Image (cartoon, helix red, strand yellow):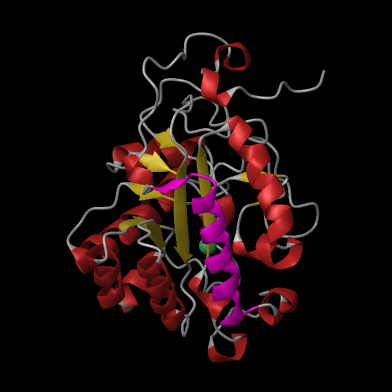
Amino acid sequence: MPPRRFSFTIDCDWVPGSQPGLERLLVLCQKHRLRGTIFFAGRFAESCPDLVRDCHRHGHEVGTHGWAHGSLEEDEDFRLATYEQQREWIRLATSAVEAACGVRPVSFRAPNLRIGETTVRILAEEGYQFDSSVPARRFDMGFGRVHYTDYFWAPLAPYRPSSHHLGQPGHGPIVEIPPSAYLFPINLAALRVLGLAVLTSMIRWIARQSPHLVFYCHPFEFLPATDQRFPKNMSKWNQRGMGPANLDLVDRLIDYVFSVGYSPAALRDTVLPDPWPTTRHPRTSAPSWSVERQRPT
Ligand SMILES: [Zn+2]
């Protein structure tokens, strides 16, 4: 059995006022000696370069998460935007993060996990090596933000996607590490609504498909909504669930994850098994530690 790896990831959407939420998360990570991956919307990095530097100094990997995502009524959509538009967002965000901490990011997460083959092509052209956006096994059924199923059957374990279909293993230049899900995601919103006991069952199921567990949360979830500035169309339900009490929930989740043998890993430290069997059909050639459930026929 390969070692179990836990990637604690934070998506820093550009929500003015949410910065103290990131500071609290850094303290929580320090308590657990947890080094993760922190994705910045470019405008967050541009507005708060000191915080990006702090994340880097604490040993976290810094990646990018769109340009102005978080502050827009009409959000950036990497499934619908043109090649040129996506490249501009990615270049702006990359420059902002690099200017803030002196390190060029190599990991990306698409806003709202909306990603396509064009995005991955641009990421490779811009020097990226890792992506964590493919919503494998996730469908929010009216809640949440993932309502497309093109990549539902993508591997849950890290893989190198085909350049023709992001949901299938291939020879592409980027390593995909899907955010973990079992219909619902392993994130703070699910933890709040479903509770730790349900999430631990989901984590046990995911562990049978992949040695890699990817959790995510946002700085704005740890502060009262009234202290922050959201776009008008941000759901009121989501805003009601925000506050410092969520830190305790995440604290207990981390304790559980470590108690069942996971060790922390930034996404950029992901190494794929070698040799990677990409020449045969993905459903018959998955490596032994990522045996995929077959699609019902
Ligand atoms: Zn986001």
Q: Is residue 244 on the magenta stretch?
A: yes
Q: Position of residue 216 (x, y in %)?
A: 53, 58
Residue 47: x and y in percent read 33, 78
Task: Look at the magenta stretch and give its main secondary structure.
Answer: helix
Percent x, y of residue 106: 30, 47
Outermost residue, left direction?
102
Residue at 53%, 8% in the rendered image = 280
Report the span colored magenta.
Answer: 242-264
Residue 296: image quadrant is top right
**What percent of the width, then of the height, locates residue 258?**
49, 52
> At 20% across and 56% down in the image, what residue appears?
103
Against 237, residue 297 (above or below) is above
Q: Residue furthest bottom?
A: 226
Q: Which one is nearer the viewer's eye here, 166 or 292? A: 292
45 drawn magenta = no
Q: Residue at x 62, y 32 (%)?
A: 208
User: Residue at 27% of width from left, 74% of height from top?
Assistant: 49
**Left or right relative to 240: residue 36:** left
Above or below residue 42? Residue 89 is above
Q: Is residue 76 visible?
A: no
Give the position of the C terminus as an image quadrant: top right
- In the rendered image, the residue lying farthest to the top is 280
Could you tell me if residue 246 is visible in this image? yes
Whether 265 is drawn above or below 103: the answer is above
